[in-house]
Structures are given as structure tokens and as C-alpha cells.
Amino acid sequence: MLKAKILFVGPSEVRPGPGPGPGERGAPMGQGLADGALRESGKTVLANFLTESSDITEYNPTQGVRILEFENPHVTSNNKGAGCEFELWDCGGDPKFESCWPALMKDAHGVVVVFNADMPSHLKELEMWYSCFVQQQLLQDTQCLLIAHHKPGSGSDRGSLSLPPPLNRLRLVHSNLEDDPEEIRLEFIKYLKSVVSSVSESRDREEMSIMT
Ligand SMILES: Nc1nc2c(ncn2[C@@H]2O[C@H](COP(=O)(O)OP(=O)(O)OP(=O)(O)O)[C@@H](O)[C@H]2O)c(=O)[nH]1
Ligand SMILES: [Mg+2]
């Protein structure tokens, strides 16, 4: 059975300074953090939703990585309907985990970069995530998906988001779990299908090169 490894990466924007105590948010109260709930990009919330795992909404920074295994009945590895197993690697966005990245990226078939379009700093970081996780790993652009995640109460206008090159070549979708959860589910299925077809194509090419 075909197996595909998909990474969820993107900013978490943990601020420098003394770390939070257990159960605290990432920065002390009263320091102009009105955007507190907007700092993380929402990778874990989305990963849980898309794999139908738990739906805990209390923020718990992902330490390193969580691996979620799933299958999707709509995504098969060939036209005979053979199934396909996925591993979704929900990576922590805190830069302190950077030393783990090479291990996380290894043998990934797809990279989803989740960001919060309301945060200018996230937009600036996007290119770094793309270059590090996609370009340097020699993945094709079709194996990458950008998700502009809209948290409840964020007022961002999805039409106005235009990204500079090379990011504008990538597929960009919006997610809004409160208003239209099915939209991102469908987009994610489309993306899984495109990952599966590039994995099977490269497998076929490998088999051909062994035979010739
Ligand atoms: N209700 C609701 N809350 C959300 C949503 N997206 C994010 N949040 C809130 O934002 C917090 C942070 O989101 P996470 O998904 O944990 O962020 P992350 O990108 O995984 O962050 P790191 O693991 O630190 O990289 C969540 O715990 C929720 O409180 C959403 O769609 N709905
Ligand atoms: Mg997380």
C-alpha cells in the first residue's frame, strides 16, 4: 500500500524572553498582546480537524512534532481503488525546534505551510518555510500547499491576499473552521490526491529506470 508523509509547518511566533509557565500563554499579560490568540498559525487545530482527531482548542505549543496517521476513503493510490496511508506530521513552529527540522523533512512527500494572514510577520516568514522545506528538499511546487488559516474573530479579507514570487506559484487556500469547515476539507482532499499522483509517478519512473 502506498504511504505518504505530509508535514504541517509554519510559524508559531513564540516571543523571545522568559518562557511561559505551565498553562500560561507565551507572553506576560499587559504587554500589548491584544493579538494574543492570533500569534500561532493553527497547525495543530487544523491537523486535528482534517484527520478527525481530538478537537481540543486550548493552546498547547507542539513540542517538536506529533504524528497523526489517517486514511481517506476519497483518496486512493490507483484507479483500482487501492487505499493509501497518510502520516501527518504536525510540527511545532517554535524556532527552538530548528535542529530537528532535517529529521522531520526526511522523505516527506508533501509540505503544508499554515499561516495567519492577519500577521505581517507570518507573511514575511512564509518564504523561509517554503525555501527550507520545499525548495531545498527538491520537492515540486505541486507537493506544497499554503493555507491561510482564519481564526474565529479574525477579520482578514481573503481577496486581498497576494503573495510575492515565488510564493504566488503555489496553491493557496483559505481555511475558516467556524464559517465553512467543508471547504478546507475538500481542498485538503484535492491536495492529497495531487501528492499521491506525484508519489506514484516518481515511483513509476524509478521502476522504469531499474528495468532499463
Ligand atoms: N476556536 C478556534 N480556535 C483556534 C482555531 N485555530 C487556532 N485556534 C486557537 O489558536 C491556538 C493555537 O493554535 P494551534 O493550532 O495550537 O497553533 P500551532 O500552529 O499548532 O502552534 P505551535 O504548535 O506552537 O507551532 C489554539 O489552541 C486555539 O486556541 C480555530 O479554527 N478555531
Ligand atoms: Mg501545534
Image (cartoon, rainbow, N blue to C red):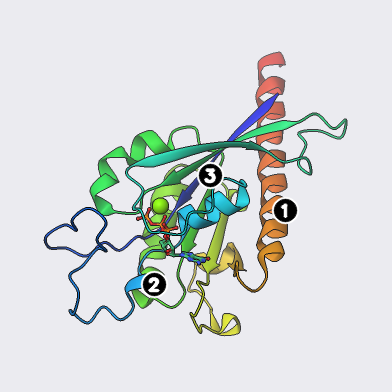
Distance in Å between CA atoms under marks 1 and 3: 18 Å
Which of the two marks, 1 or 3, is nearer to us in this view?
1
Choose between 172 and 87: the one closer to the eye: 87
Find residue 113 and report its horizontal and vertical position in percent: 48, 57
Which residue is under mark 2? 38
Q: Which residue is painted at 34% across and 78% down in the image?
A: 35
Query: Is the CB of the residue bearing disc 2 within 8 angstroms of ligand 1?
Result: yes
Kindly tell me whether residue 141 is visible in this rendering: no
Instruction: Name the residue rendered at 22%, 65% in the picture.
Output: 15
Q: Nearer the viewer, mark 1 or mark 2?
A: 2
Label 3's element?
A: loop
The crowding category of the residue bearing disc 1, from other C-alpha atoms within 10 Å (few below 14, some 14 to 19, many at least 20), is some
**Looking at numbered disc 1 in the image, what kind of residue is underneath it?**
Lys
Q: Is residue 146 above or below residue 85?
A: below
Mark 2 residue element: helix
Q: Which mark is residue 133?
A: none
Q: Quadrant of the C terminus?
A: top right
Mark in the foreground, 3 or 2: 2
Q: Which residue position is annotated with label 3? A: 139
Query: Which residue is label 1 attached to?
Result: 190
**Spatial distance from mark 1 to mark 2, Cα to Cα?**
27 Å
Q: Outermost residue toward the right?
A: 80
* Residue in the image at 88% along x and 30% along y: 80
